[in-house]
Image (tube, rainbow, N blue to C red):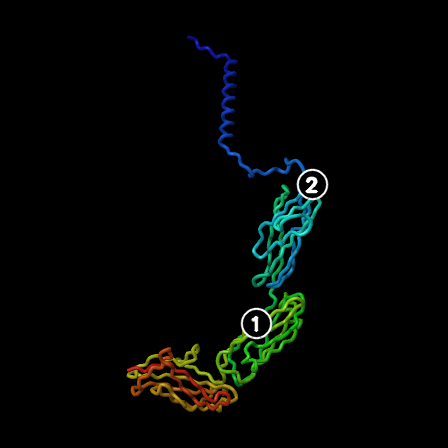
Amino acid sequence: MPFRLPNPWLVAAVAALIGSLTGGGTALLRARSTPLRSGSLRADSSDQSGPRAQVDVPETHFNFGRVSVGGTGSHSFFLRNTGMAPLVLTKGATSCTCTVSDFDGGGTGDGSSQTVPPGGQTSVRIEWKGKGSGGAFRQRATIFTNDPARPEIAFEIEGDVIPSWKAVPAMIGLSGLSPGESTAVTFNLYTYAKDPPELKTIRVSSAELAEKISVTAEPLSTEALAAEPAATGGFLVRLNLATGLPLGKLRTDVEASFGFADEEVVATIPLQGVVTGDLMLVGPAWDRRSKAVRLGTVSRQKGMVTKLFLTVKGDARDQVKPVLKEVIPAGLHVEIDEPASIGGGGVVRIGLTLSISADSPPANNLCTSAASGGRIVLETGHPDSPELSIPVCVAIAE
């Protein structure tokens, strides 16, 4: 049987019917499978009809220059509604050291938000506080609007945080102090405020040392200020340490109180040192940290011999001729050598031989909570240190 093609008009009609059914079914499927999302759509400003709010902001950036550590500042940014509908402003996020005050000016609101009528104006004040040790400072604050063309505005402030003061050096460290010699030391105290500082008081904090350490201050010279470019003022501080300082560690503070036009500051600078006097001990058994002779536990059967050296400097060095006054424990033997000049005659050295022998009685003087320490006491003949007590930590065992 011969093959006959279908009627072309019939084919076209069937194809049109199938296509319309398929398209409708697809549209219906999409409508049923896609939920309606409320609030997630955003009107395109180009398609929006009717009056709109329009925000105009003359500036969004402010450089405040310099603020001292702990100092505060603020700046107001203005916002105008140049549109035809009310402008709604809402506070957004701020950086950690920046706060946004309530809106101020025309409009109504609860503080955290404000509605500005067409043609109206308001302002927002951003406040900041200088924190840290100083350096560059930059912070941001955000305001949200209902202007579809500008829904978010970021205000930025920047500048430099500077310290109110700085001491150079930051700590006064003194070594080799002698109770028989006076000492003078100076340091610079810089200030960074726009106003020159007015000195109120300056002294050492220790009432005990105040009689021995006097403190004076005078304005820094132009040359000294030039060495610290950011400084605007400051003082040259002079410490005069008189004779008679107590032996041992010296720890106190220099306290300077000074004021600016709108601020009063107290600067505290540590002062540390060691007063060793003209007499100093050296040797393998001498512990400089604990200032004691540490011999440990010694068997009297084996015995022990060690050497200490007492060095003496200063004008009274030739007067020092030590005499043994007391020894604890009794089993510790001490022999004193004749003084000998060293270092071109500027220092006298005296040897002390310490020994424990078989005839030494047992003892426990280990400088612990259970056993008190021993000592060697010498009469020196020195006018400032006539007696020298040397701590000894030792136990004598069988």
Q: Which of 169/111 is in front?
A: 111
Q: Quadrant of the C terminus?
A: bottom left
Q: Earlier in the sequence, mark 2 or mark 1?
A: 2
Q: CA distance from mark 2 to mark 1?
A: 60 Å
The answer to whether residue 188 is left or right of residue 276 is: right
Considering the image in quadrants, where does the N terminus appear?
top left
> What kind of residue is marked 2?
Met
Label 1 CA crowd tier, 10 Å (few <14, some 14–19, many 20+): some
**Nearest to viewer (mark 2 / mark 1):** 2
Q: Nearer the viewer, residue 152 or 234?
A: 152
Whether residue 29 appears in this view of the structure is yes
Among all residues in the image, which is located at the extreme top? Answer: 1
Name which residue lies at 59% across and 80% down: 214
Q: How crowded is the residue under tag 2: few (<14 C-alpha within 10 Å), some, or many (20+)? A: some
- Picture quadrant where residue 266 is located: bottom right
Q: Is residue 130 above or below residue 27?
A: below
Tell me the residue that label 1 is attached to: 268
Residue nearest the viewer, comparing 45 with 184:
45
The picture places residue 393, in percent across and down from the top left corner, at 37, 81
* Percent x, y of residue 336: 40, 89
Amino acid at dot 1 = Thr
Secondary structure of the residue carrying numbered label 1: strand
Image position of 383 with respect to 57: above or below: below
Q: Is residue 299 left or right of residue 52?
A: left
Residue 84: image tag = 2
User: Can residue 183 be seen from the camera position used here?
Assistant: no
